Amino acid sequence: MNKLFDALSKYNRREQTILLVGVLAVVLYILWMGVLSPLKEKREQQLVTNASTAAALERVKVLAARINNAESAANQQSAASSGNISQLIDSTLQANGLRMSGFQPGTRGEVRVRLDNVNYAAITQWLYDLEYKHDVSIKDLSMASTTTPGQVTANVRLSKN
């Protein structure tokens, strides 16, 4: 340390100040370039990595939910299709919040179902589920509106494929 002070004592006060400020600037520059700048870049990279990982996690959650829904729908479908058509109709009506007012078995596995004062959207969803999820054909369908808006009375003839 004495050698440093001896070396600085050769210069006047103004030159000493300039040298010390220059050394301080060089030390700060080295600190910035060697430590702080790489840390800043690493932090930015980590933020990008975290954001992409979070997005991937959300996609995985959505896909897992779809798989779970598909599995439960397949289980329900297999459980419903394992029974006869009357059990299938009863379970799908309950799943859609509907109640039948008449049920008449027919020939060749056909059935007639009467639904009174039911929601139009619910009955169309029920018919869609029967046809596309449970492989039941709609042979005949007649609907009539009721005095209540959005409500219908329907007669449906169905057969299992």
Image (cartoon, rainbow, N blue to C red):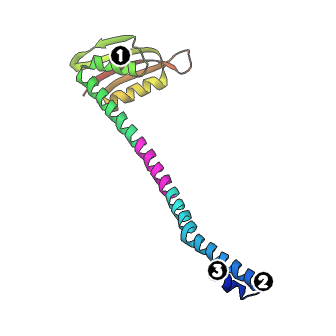
First reached walking from the N terminus: tag 3 or tag 2: 3
> In which quadrant of the rendered image does the C terminus lie?
top left
First reached walking from the N terminus: tag 1 or tag 2: 2
Please report contact status of discs 1 and 3: CB closer than 8 Å, yes or no.
no
**Quadrant in the picture for residue 82:** top left
Which range is magenta? Answer: 48-61
Farthest left residue in view: 108
Label 3 – label 2 distance at C-alpha = 17 Å
Q: Residue at x 71, y 89 (%)?
A: 10
Is 21 drawn above or below residue 155 in the view shown? below
At label 2, which amino acid type do we have? Arg
Is 103 drawn above or below residue 17 in the view shown? above
Q: Nearer the viewer, residue 160 or 74?
A: 74
Residue 137: x %, y % from top left? 30, 28
- At mark 1, the secondary structure is strand
- At mark 2, the secondary structure is helix
Residue placed under numbered mark 3 in the picture: 2
Residue 35: x %, y % from top left? 55, 68
Residue density around tag 3, few if under 14, some if 14–19, many if 20 or more, within 10 Å: few
